[in-house]
Amino acid sequence: MFRTASWISVVSLHSPMHTTSFLLALALITLAIAEYPTPGTPAFLNDNNVLQYALTLENLEATFYTNGLLAFSAANFSAIGLPASVYPFLTTIRDHEIAHVNALSSILTARGATPVTPCNYTFTYTNIPSFLATAAALERTGVSAYDGAISSLVQTDLVTLAAGVATVEARHSAYLNLLTAAVPFPNVTDVPATQTQIFGIAGAFFNGTCAQLNIVAANPIQNATMFRNVSSYNQTVFNQTAAYLNDNNVLQYALTLENLEAAFYSAVLSNISAASFAAGGIGTDNYAYIQLIQAQEVAHVGYLTTLLTARGATPVAACSYQNIYFPDSAIGVQQFIQTAIALEAVGTSAYIGAASFLTDEGILTIAAAVATVEARHTSYLRALQANLTANATANLPFPNVVDPGYNVTAVATAAAPFFTNLGACLTFDLPVSADLFRPNQTAVASSSSSSSSVASSSSSSTRSSSSSSSSASSTSSSTRSSSSSVSGSSSTRSTSTQTSTTSDASMKVVAGVVIAALALAF
């Protein structure tokens, strides 16, 4: 029933030695190039344009780190008082960017496109501080680019890939912010940017005329709405009512996790004193960062609650939690950090895994922007743990080339120990892949090996009307704000005349079976 994104879930890489395995895993994405979008159609070509756009930025980053780490040695970093872990951490970032380049190039080639190649670049850093400042700016730009472009993708596997790369870029960004004395997670949600805005920022690094950049600029990415909802394309028209309700279920799912995180940090800050944090090695600055994480999780709860209410749904309430209280001592602080790392990692992977469930581009943009903030939290906490334990190897802030996307079952299994009764909290239908709301979903499932979970539930393409009081509505009003919108986007859904082929009752049965199975697993 649930989309597992299995090809990406197993990718957890820690060194360049794994690059070949990484590419083999990503090569599985080509198996999904069958029905939606059909090769050669405008939607398919637009997905290629998004990949080329991402590759243009990854080429820039890979070249930057390669050149910079040739110019400066580990001894140079140590000489200005930086920890010994900084240089190897930066080499890991470099290796990630190179792996991203290789992966995107392989995918584009498999899709019949010629990948853009690196340009000539101008980098103006003169010393390590200016090198780190430039790195921080590049990573921040990369996060905004991925968050802004993800909603332009139609193929759901590519959505999962983009979400998993975006969170890795966010991890890099948080760490580099720490090195440059900036807040590692400066916003409640990261700020998506349009392609035009990104090229306006990154263009300063391109030396003279770049033919490859001109190719990408000549094929600007389009919002996926025009490919998903315009019936004249006759390829990805959605069952609007079912998709709308499923988007609500994704938001309820996210809210369930955000409620947990907000309660967790609130309990910790209420029960562990500032003095105990100090005894545990958490100074004033880091204590303030933990308070900021708590405030951001509370803000996420408020934002999702408001959005669900505006969409006609009743937001899930906070549940009864356990295992979120720790001793008011240095030992309690260490237990808190270990638990926080685990919770933030699960939250990040939950957002990545659910990204391909969303139909509404506005909500997908929001989810991506929240996911990258969760990834920032994780990166910061792992860096903090590395400093406290003097074990950098075990606490790499960015352990994956691509962050994994967890399916609903995996997330529930990981989160269950923190709920006194998780089953009682699941008062909504569990979300499913957006592929299920496209026509001929049975054909899609059988033709795509990466959608094996869809094949087992292709008959369940309709969400129960009880999950939202807005079941009669088939248009979404969650239009993006002007400060974070992708140019030309409208997240309003056009009405589809496609009718459901499955009763609400059958979906209720499937959801009930899954919840029962989860209860047995706990």
Image (spheres, rainbow, N blue to C red):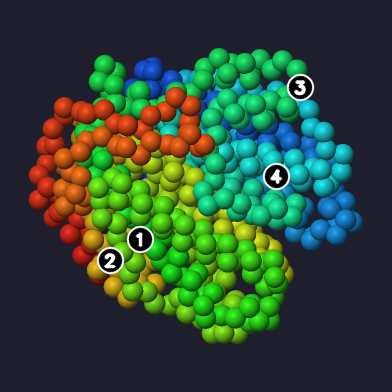
Q: Is residue 226 above or below residue 347?
A: above
Q: Residues within 10 Å of mark 3 (few under 14, many from 20)?
A: few
* Residue at the right extreme of this rendering: 79
- Which label sits on residue 256? 1
Q: Earlier in the sequence, mark 1 or mark 3?
A: 3
Mark 2 touches mark 1? (CB < 8 Å): yes
Along the line of sight, the residue nearer the viewer: 78 or 314: 314
Label 3 is placed on what type of residue? Asn
Q: Can residue 38 be seen in this view?
A: yes
Residue drawn 51% across the image and 58% down it: 296
Mark 1 touches mark 3? (CB < 8 Å): no
Q: In this view, does 96 lie above or below 75?
A: above
Along the line of sight, the residue nearer the viewer: 427 or 335: 427
Residue drawn 21% across the image and 65% down it: 516
Separation of disc 1 and disc 4 at Cα? 32 Å
Q: Which of marks 3 and 2 is nearer the N terminus?
A: 3
